[in-house]
Amino acid sequence: MTGDIAENEENKPEMHAHVILGRHDGTTRGGPLMEAIVRSTLELTMTETPAHLKRRMRKDIHVALIDIS
């Protein structure tokens, strides 16, 4: 899993994550993580960045991008 936690336009934290998950038959599935259920344990390593991340909607391209200015 890789991603970030940034403030949205309402100044609330919002997670954006992409994952690759292994299946019982050895195949994988990947993409954006929308929700998850952890059945046993989950270990995450988080790194704090020196910049305060804020995500802003770019109306011209209809995508929320991180604004670090």
Image (cartoon, grey):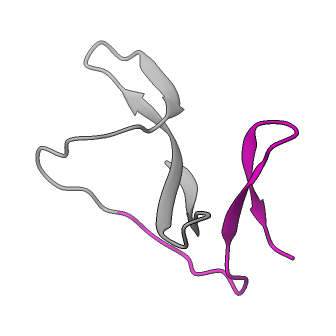
Please give left or right for residue 3 compared with residue 35 in the image.
Answer: right
Position in image of residue 49 (x %, y %): 66, 80
Q: Quadrant of residue 50?
A: bottom right
Q: Is residue 21 above or below residue 14?
A: above
Q: Which residue, as the protein is rendered here, is positioned at the far bottom?
A: 50
Q: Residue at x 17, y 55 (%)?
A: 41
Magenta stretch holds residue 64: yes
Please give left or right for residue 16 compared with residue 50 in the image.
Answer: left
Position in image of residue 69 (x %, y %): 87, 76
Q: Residue at x 28, y 40 (%)?
A: 36
Q: Quadrant of residue 7?
A: bottom right
Position in image of residue 52 (x %, y %): 67, 81
* Part of the protein shown in magenta: 44-69
Q: Is residue 57 above or below residue 61?
A: below
**Which of the two residues, 51 or 69, is positioned nearer the viewer here?**
69
Magenta stretch holds residue 60: yes
Number of marks present in the image shown: 0
Main secondary structure of the magenta stretch? loop
Q: Is residue 46 above or below residue 21?
A: below
**Which of the two residues, 58 or 53, is positioned nearer the viewer here?**
58
Q: Residue at x 54, y 67 (%)?
A: 10
Please give left or right for residue 1 compared with residue 49 in the image.
Answer: left
Q: Residue at x 58, y 67 (%)?
A: 6
Position in image of residue 19 (x %, y %): 48, 39
